[in-house]
Amino acid sequence: MASAADGLAQASKTDSPLAGLIDRWIYVFMAALFVATALAGFIPDSLGKIAAVEAGQRAAFPPVLHVHAVLMGTWLMLLLAQTTLMATGNSRHHQKLGIASFLLAPAIILSGFVLVPTIYAQVWNAAASALPEMAEQKRGLLAISTNIILLQSRAGVVFALCVVLALRARRVDSGFHKRMIILATLTPLGAAINRITWLPSAMPASPLSLDIFILILLLPMFVWDLFRLGRVHRAYIVWLALWLPASIAIQLLWGSSWWQAAGQTLMGYP
């Protein structure tokens, strides 16, 4: 009798108006959380780098960096708009606006894979032209940049795969679709997290702290789903099957002499 009563209490709890409200707005919350994370990471970092450029302490930003930043910012705003439209019952506008993702996602991926070697070339040239007293510092920065390629590659590949899976499922499995879009957007947020200087970090020695914070960002949606569904939704399993092997590989390769040589060769600097 006690277990039956507990089951009825749980059903009543999860079917309450509050549960329905959270069901609608949890995705808006996640999108807003991602926007806040990006702003917290990139605004102070960008202002500092702009000041360094104006002082002649670093090279000017390449145009592709501005393009990539605008595209990623647009993606975050699109996610916030799309989740808000669904939360407020405007599914027709959601479907129309969603067409933009078919153009925006490939543009983000393309700009990202152009940006990586472009930034690396700047760091390489700075290291090659450094004064003797600055040479060691520049070589250290180059080693860090070579490691960062691993994170950038994971972000680009996992983001692309998750978006493809999400868009394919949009008409047949809305639950998988909306979760996978959130998970796709979560994956590259390590770039913003790494720039939030007041967070504890193991960087540049290890990227483990970034992975931990990515998982922490996922917790609100994951915990709610676990409570609401009583199981792990398959979207998380698919995402983890993509993200976790890449993360393990990054941990193993990070800072290794083999990757330092391979990364430089990959960027065209044997």
Image (spheres, helix red, strand yellow):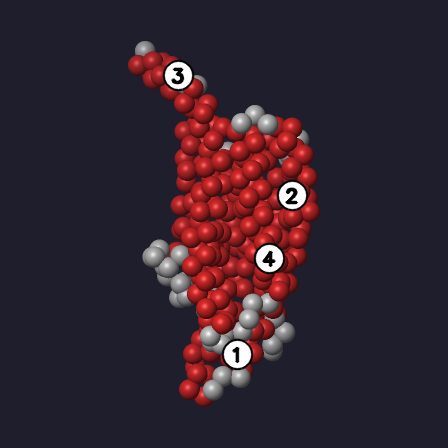
Q: State yes or no: discs 3 and 1 in contact (Cβ < 8 Å).
A: no
Separation of residues labelled 2 and 3 (CA atoms): 38 Å
> Label 4 crowding class (10 Å Cα cut-off): few <14, some 14-19, many 20+?
many
Which numbered tag is attached to residue 12? 3
Separation of residues labelled 4 and 3 (CA atoms): 47 Å
Where does residue 251 sit, x and y in percent of width and height? Answer: 45, 60
> Label 1 crowding class (10 Å Cα cut-off): few <14, some 14-19, many 20+?
some
Q: Which of marks 2 and 4 is nearer the N terminus?
A: 4
Along the viewing direction, whichever of 70 and 204 lies nearer the viewer: 70
Q: Which of marks 2 and 1 is nearer the N terminus?
A: 2
Where does residue 220 sit, x and y in percent of width and height? Answer: 41, 38
Q: Callout 3: helix, strand or loop?
A: helix
- Choose top left, top right, bottom left or bottom right for residue 132: bottom left
Identify the amino acid type marked 2: Ser
Q: If the image is split into quadrants, where does the N terminus sit?
A: top left
Q: Can residue 56 be seen in this view?
A: yes
Residue linked to disc 1: 126
Where does residue 201 sit, x and y in percent of width and height? Answer: 36, 59
Q: Left or right? Give the position of 116 relative to 41.
A: right
Separation of residues labelled 3 and 1 (CA atoms): 63 Å
The residue sitting at the left extreme is 2
Q: If the image is split into quadrants, where does the C terminus sit?
A: bottom right
Residue linked to disc 4: 68
Q: Callout 1: helix, strand or loop?
A: helix
Q: Can residue 237 be seen in this view?
A: no
In this picture, is 173 found above or below 101? above
Tag nearer the camera, 2 or 3: 2
The residue sitting at the top extreme is 1
